[in-house]
Every structure is written in structure tokens, then in C-alpha cells.
């Protein structure tokens, strides 16, 4: 597993931040919303309506059977042979100019809650404000043909800014959210756990978690100097509830590619999304990101984290939805703490063959670390990607955008295949997404002790020199978890490396308060410092066996 590469200091971040901010604001506040199910789930009530003019037709239009993934694949393949034609931005002025508060004031009425099957229901999102794109929704029960779920103004309380307004069926929806009864004994007490809203973004959470980071269907040229492209899910087929699982099919359209997706979602204490996708490139794509994850990191326990970054001026000790990237390859598991405050966006690449898994995680689980009563960062899940097919040789790429705006998702992680992406060549992949709360988590193996904190300060504080050397830095890295020796006299071997400069005088000691071990290591930077990141690595071994993850930091 190699270190960072591809220094993209000239990447155009403004448009990327704007698009991620749009999606994040649209999803704000939806943290486990309870949706009352007012209807008999066994009743034949689908809220389906006539397909509005201009909306996409279902691939099996006229056939008395459900749409399948093969149908959506055929549709995507056909579209890829033609030039890209985005849906018209046909929002009335009063909708396109809605501010955040007025958009949030739009509410779904009780009759807008649609039962999907035992324990599941759906609510649509109204278009307006930053959510301009229309998506077409079809509902299909098991064994039945899909029926268009057309826009109906009677399903919404439009709020004071739009009081008295009405819109035609052709308006469509911006997206949808799905609720589930986590307690099988109380099927009518449903909580929102899954939302698709904006571009190819979606969010999922487990029981007792709240929304945090987002997943996406695909990432196209993230960090490229030419700017990033954001394809859209334009059509969804929602239904087929079976044994506590719901299946959603989606059609992806963008200037550079089309795609067909199947999401098989199983909610629970840890929710799982099994993803199967077929992609059809319209052009060569230099950076195609599979299983992309998008998150927010403003400030963490190691301060700004980046060289010469200004401290975060905030009453809260930490502000983030994820605090690190975890990458699993054969024989190694690497933890990279996230950073913020660089002068320009940065791309780091972690090469692995084969990839066994990666994820953006929220390891800090204490309220005292955040002190934010409303945001509840300590309850936000991580997402772990388990590849199943189609990943091959490549690298997990981490893209970090400097940001001071909490409403902006400034972190992206995705797997970028090494094989060229050529027009007309189909790409198939399959993977699972698993929500991760407190660790250790069953989805992440092997059972190595994990990095739980990284703290950095002046080495002069504990190891003064005469004359003082203010550029010396002391790293204190805490490890906790299985396999760590309980004997404080145990012989611990420390492996340290730096891509420039040097570590000196490492020391490891047991932390009786936590049962973990702490590594102290002084880093002496080179003169002069290089322009890019200096990559630092450390891990612990005992009795000839590696017992911790590899800590991978930057200076």
C-alpha cells in the first residue's frame, strides 16, 4: 500500500464545494425523522398516478411485470449511445429562488406517506431552492408492473412563502426518503433511515444513529484541474419489500457516462446496502471513482492538521462527520486521520491489490469531544465499503478540500481503478456499504488494535533543547482494541517511517486508564520542508506479530 501521490494543488474546488454544499443543505435536519404510517400496509394503496408529460418511461412500459436490473441496464446502454440531454431546469421562479428556511418549511402531509410493504414507507421531496433537478419515481410491488408516482400538490403543505400556490403534475419530485419500523413488534412506528436527494447522493443510517456522511453512485474526475462532474440519478423504481429488505433500482445519467444500479437495503442496528452497478462511459474518464463516500471535516483532535493552517475559531473542540479514512489490504490495515486547512485541495492515493475494504469512519464517540447538543456528531455513522467484484487493481483516493463551512462536504474517498475507462466499454461492479458505529465492528477485520487518537504539539514542551528548536513536533498516538498486551513491561517493537525528515526517540507505554498503548515519537522536519505533504507512518508489534493498524499521518 503506497502513500499519497497526485498532488492536485490546482484543482478547481469552487464548483465542487458548491455542489456538495447544495446536497448537504438539502439533507440537513433529517436525522432519524419519525414518519407516522397512517395506512394499512396490507391495503392496495400505491398513490400511483398518471405519468406526467415529459417524464421518463419505464423500460417495461406496457408489460405486466416489474422492471428488473436488466431492464435498467438496457436503458442505460441505449442512452450511452446518444448525446447527453439533461432534464430541463423548468422550475417556476418562486421555487427556484426559495431560501433555505422556506425550503425547509415545505412539509409532506400525512396522506403523502406511501406504504411500500411490511414495515416500510416512502415520502417524496418537493423541488425548490437548491434542489432543482427533477427525478421520476415509479412504485412497484413484488410481481407487479411499475406505476408512475406523479406529483400531486395536495400531498404537501408548501409553507407560508408558497401559500396558495399549486403546480402541475409535470413538476415531479426532487427525491425521496424511506422509513422503516426498526422494532418489528411496532410496525407503525417508523423512522427515516434512507434518503436519495441530489445528483447521485444518498444517505443511510442504522438504528440509534443520525445522518452524517453521504454515499454516491459514482464520482467523475474528483480533483481534476478541469473540475468534477456530478451525474444524476434521474429515475427510480422503488419497491419489492421482502424479509426486512427493500430494493431500489436507479438510472444514472451524466455527460460522461450512464449507469444502472440496484440497491438492496437492509436496515438494522448496522444497516447494509448491497450495490450492483453497470456503467457505460460516453468518453474516456481519467478518474472514475467507484463506491465514493463524501463527508465533512473542519477540525479534529490534532488541531488544524495541516502545515501552517490557522486554528478553528469555534467553541466546540471538534467539528466533523468523519475523522479518518481506513483502508484494508492483505496483511495491513491503514488509518489516515483527516486534515483541513491546506492552502489548496490535496489528493492522496493508497494503492492496494486486492482491495479488501475502505471507509470514512467517525471514531470519536464521546459527546465531550464535540459539545454540540444539536449536531450530535458522536452519533453519526461511518460507512465501510466491502468490494465484491469489479474493483481489480487501483487505489483508494482521498480528496481533501480546505473549508471553514460546516455546511460543506469537503472530504471525498473513492476507489479509482488503474485500468483506463474507455467509451463504449461496459464496467460492472458490486459492493456492500455497512454503517459503522462504535468499534470494534464485525464488518471490519482482522482484529487489530485501532488508532483512536492522534495528538500533535511542540516537542519542546516535554523534551526541551538548548537552544530551543520550535519546529520539532511530538506525536502522541493512542491505540486501543484486541491483541494489545496487558503487561506494561511487555516488549513493544515500534516501526516508524517518514518520507522526509526523521523520527527520533520513539517510546511506547501502556495506558492503564484505557487498557490501550500510547506511542510517543518526536518528528524533526527537513530543512527546507517540501512543498507537499510529508507522509509519516507508525505501527506496533509484539512477540514478532503486528498488533496494530498502520497509522498514516501528514506533516
Image (cartoon, rainbow, N blue to C red):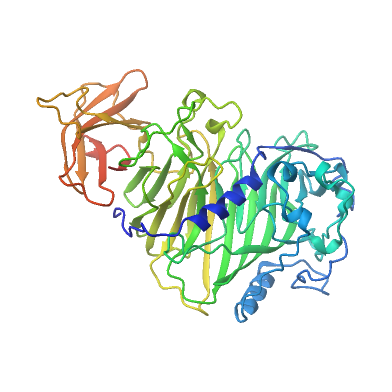
Q: Is residue 329 above or below residue 523?
A: below
- For the point 76% across and 70% down, the residue is 58
**Residue extending farthest top:** 513
What is the x, y in percent for residue 146? 80, 64
Numbered disc total: 0
Task: State whether residue 504 appears in this view.
Answer: yes
Task: State whether residue 355 appears in this view.
Answer: no
- For the point 58% across and 62% down, the residue is 276
- For the point 55% across and 27% down, the residue is 372
What is the x, y in percent for residue 30? 67, 40
In front here: 114 or 305? 305
In front here: 225 or 119? 225
Q: Quadrant of residue 455?
A: top left
Q: Is residue 465 left or right of residue 10?
A: left
Q: Is residue 128 above or below residue 189?
A: below
Q: Is residue 530 left or right of residue 483?
A: left
Q: Is residue 457 above or below residue 389?
A: above
What is the x, y in percent for residue 57? 77, 72
What is the x, y in percent for residue 196? 66, 53
Q: Quadrant of the N terminus?
A: bottom left
Q: Quadrant of residue 63?
A: bottom right
In front here: 385 or 7? 7
Q: Quadrant of the C terminus?
A: top left
Amino acid at each position: 500500500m503506497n502513500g499519497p501521490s497526485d498532488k492536485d494543488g490546482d484543482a478547481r474546488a469552487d464548483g465542487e464545494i458548491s455542489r456538495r454544499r447544495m446536497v448537504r443543505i438539502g439533507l440537513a435536519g433529517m436525522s432519524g425523522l419519525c414518519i407516522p404510517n397512517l395506512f394499512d400496509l396490507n391495503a392496495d394503496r400505491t398513490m400511483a398516478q398518471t405519468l406526467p408529460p415529459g417524464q421518463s418511461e419505464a423500460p417495461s412500459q406496457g408489460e405486466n411485470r416489474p422492471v428488473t436490473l436488466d431492464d435498467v441496464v438496457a436503458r442505460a446502454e441505449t442512452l450511452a449511445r446518444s448525446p447527453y440531454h439533461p432534464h430541463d431546469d423548468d422550475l417556476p421562479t418562486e421555487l427556484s429562488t426559495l431560501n433555505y428556511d422556506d425550503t425547509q418549511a415545505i412539509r409532506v402531509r400525512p396522506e403523502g406517506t406511501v406504504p411500500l410493504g411490511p414495515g416500510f414507507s416512502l415520502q417524496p421531496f418537493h423541488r425548490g431552492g437548491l434542489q432543482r433537478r427533477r427525478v421520476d419515481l415509479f412504485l412497484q410491488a413484488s410481481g407487479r408492473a411499475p406505476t408512475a408516482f406523479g406529483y400531486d400538490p395536495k400531498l404537501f403543505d408548501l409553507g407560508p412563502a408558497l401559500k396558495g400556490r399549486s403546480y402541475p403534475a409535470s413538476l415531479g419530485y426532487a427525491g425521496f426518503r424511506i422509513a422503516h419500523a426498526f422494532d418489528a413488534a411496532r410496525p407503525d412506528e417508523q423512522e427515516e433511515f434512507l434518503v436519495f436527494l441530489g445528483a447521485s447522493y444518498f444517505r443511510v443510517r442504522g438504528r440509534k444513529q443520525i445522518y452524517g456522511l453521504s454515499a454516491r453512485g459514482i464520482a467523475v474526475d474528483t480533483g481534476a484541474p478541469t473540475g468534477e462532474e456530478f451525474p444524476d440519478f434521474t429515475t427510480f423504481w422503488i419497491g419489492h419489500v421482502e424479509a426486512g429488505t427493500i430494493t431500489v433500482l436507479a438510472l444514472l445519467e451524466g455527460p460522461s457516462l450512464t449507469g444502472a444500479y440496484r440497491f438492496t437495503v437492509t436496515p438494522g442496528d448496522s444497516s447494509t446496502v448491497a450495490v450492483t452497478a453497470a456503467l457505460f462511459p460516453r468518453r474516456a474518464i481519467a478518474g472514475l471513482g467507484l463506491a465514493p463516500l463524501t463527508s465533512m471535516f473542519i477540525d479534529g483532535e490534532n488541531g488544524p492538521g495541516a502545515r501552517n493552517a490557522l486554528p478553528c475559531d469555534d467553541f466546540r473542540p471538534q467539528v466533523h462527520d468523519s475523522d479518518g479514512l481506513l483502508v484494508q489490504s492483505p496483511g495491513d490495515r491503514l488509518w489516515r486521520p483527516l486534515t483541513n486547512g491546506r492552502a489548496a485541495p490535496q489528493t492522496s492515493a493508497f494503492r492496494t491489490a486486492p482491495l479488501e475494504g475502505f471507509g470514512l469512519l467517525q471514531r470519536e464517540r464521546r459527546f465531550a469531544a464535540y459539545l454540540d447538543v444539536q449536531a450530535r456528531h458522536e452519533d453519526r455513522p461511518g460507512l465501510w465499503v466491502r468490494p465484491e467484484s469489479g474493483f481489480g487493481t487501483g487505489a483508494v483516493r482521498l480528496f481533501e478540500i480546505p473549508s471553514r463551512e460546516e455546511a460543506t462536504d469537503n472530504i471525498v474517498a473513492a476507489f479509482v481503478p488503474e485500468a483506463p475507462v474507455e467509451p463504449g466499454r461496459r464496467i460492472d461492479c458490486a459492493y456492500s456499504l455497512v454503517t459503522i458505529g462504535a468499534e470494534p465492528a464485525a464488518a471490519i477485520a482482522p482484529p487489530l488494535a485501532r488508532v483512536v487518537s492522534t495528538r500533535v504539539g511542540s516537542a519542546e514542551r516535554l523534551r526541551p533543547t538548548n537552544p530551543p528548536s520550535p519546529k520539532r513536533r511530538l506525536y502522541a498516538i493512542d491505540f486501543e482494541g484486541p491483541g494489545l498486551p496487558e503487561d506494561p513491561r511487555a516488549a513493544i517493537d515500534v516501526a516508524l517511517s517518514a518520507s522526509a525528515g526523521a523520527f527520533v526517540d520513539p517510546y511506547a507505554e501502556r495506558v492503564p486508564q484505557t487498557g490501550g498503548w500510547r506511542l510517543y515519537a518526536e518528528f524533526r522536519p527537513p530543512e527546507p520542508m517540501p512543498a507537499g505533504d510529508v507522509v509519516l507512518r507508525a505501527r506496533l508489534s509484539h512477540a514478532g506479530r503486528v498488533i496494530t493498524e498502520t497509522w498514516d499521518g501528514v506533516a
